Image: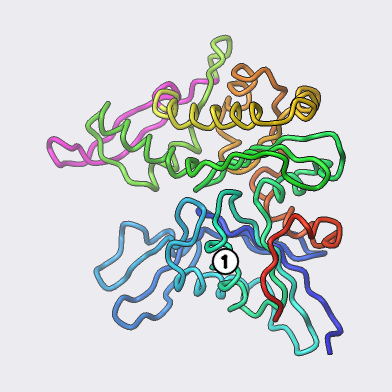
Amino acid sequence: MCLFVKDVGIDLGTVNTLIYIKNKGIVLNEPSVIAVDYDTKDLLATGQEAKEMIGKTPENIIVVRPLQDGVISDFEMTARMLKAYIKRAVPEPSFFTKIRVVVGVPSGVTEVEKRAVEEVVRETGANEVYIMEEPLAAAIGSGLAVDNPMGCMIADIGGGTSDIAIIALGGIVTNTSLRYAGDKQNDAIIAYMRKQYDLLIGEKTAEEIKKKIGCAYIDKDDPESIKQMEVRGRNIISGLPKIISITSIDILNALEDPIKIIIDGIKKTLEEAPPEIAADIVSSGLVLSGGGALIQGLDKLIEISTGLNVSIAENALEAVAEGTGKSLESIERIQKYLWKGSKK
């Protein structure tokens, strides 16, 4: 007999995993990274502690990012990581407690990938598992009126995927899912530094550069929009350590192609929308969420490229997690738009 229901929302992201619990909000926000001992298979670290080990481990320690491009690439490691996170976020449930979980996944994932996510979550002890497409979760978390007949549009730019969707009457009308987001932007920065400055840098340094001086558009009338930072790496030619100084203009050039792909995805989603809904979007505009939304000038560049009014969600980083959790408050209303696993 079940006396209590615990509602949990999970944003199982390529870069970060967030867990939302009803009446508590976000209770966990950790990098999606796990470190294990290669010989004994013992779990050594998860989250930020494991992330700090990237690129610095001896041969007997392996550090894994078990999700790639928004989907599970290593089932066993994802399960172990998620178990550790849920154990930290959700105290040991009693026999009388039923756990309901909504998990956010990219809108382009297959039935097989959804089943894999469900199995991972069930291994943590969940009784009911619902799979929600991330743009719908991000829209709910951002406070958009997803139930209205008037359409709203969101672009959730995460680490592994960029999910763009037009939503009306509680469901997705048209969407585009690009496995091209934050990770590909980091790769572009690494390639640019190598080509332009003969400097070899790692993924962690590229991420730091993007956060500090990442730029999609520079306002020529605002000299303060051009930032500068020192970057340390290895000279490809000499093999020796090297320090150089770069500016926002360098990163503007490095990110030009990855950002163009996202903007093309936004245009494609608009082109595929029914005329009446497209007219709604002209009025309601576009909301950006996810870590990629915070790149300086991205909202301005999209406005110039599409003619839409573009705003950034106040809770851009937590929107998907909050949306998955809040959706459980009205699960009956939006249930028909969710993928539901088998009952336990």
Query: Would you call the spot at circle 1 few (<14 residues within 10 Å), some (14-19), or many (20 or more)?
Result: many
Q: Position of residue 306 (x, y in %)?
A: 63, 20
49 relative to 142, above or below? below
Q: Quarter-wise, where is residue 95 in the image?
A: bottom right
330 relative to 314, above or below? below
**Is residue 239 a member of the stretch shown in magenta?**
yes
Which residue: 37% across, 46% down?
A: 203
Question: What kind of residue is marked 1?
Answer: Val
Which residue in the structure is indicated by mark 1?
A: 117
Q: What residue span does the magenta drawing correspond to? A: 225-250
Q: Nearer the viewer, residue 151 or 262?
A: 151
Q: Position of residue 338 (x, y in %)?
A: 72, 58
| Left or right: residue 262 compared with residue 56 | right
Which residue: 53% across, 62% down?
A: 113
In the picture, the quarter occupied by the N terminus is bottom right
| Left or right: residue 120 compared with residue 202 | right
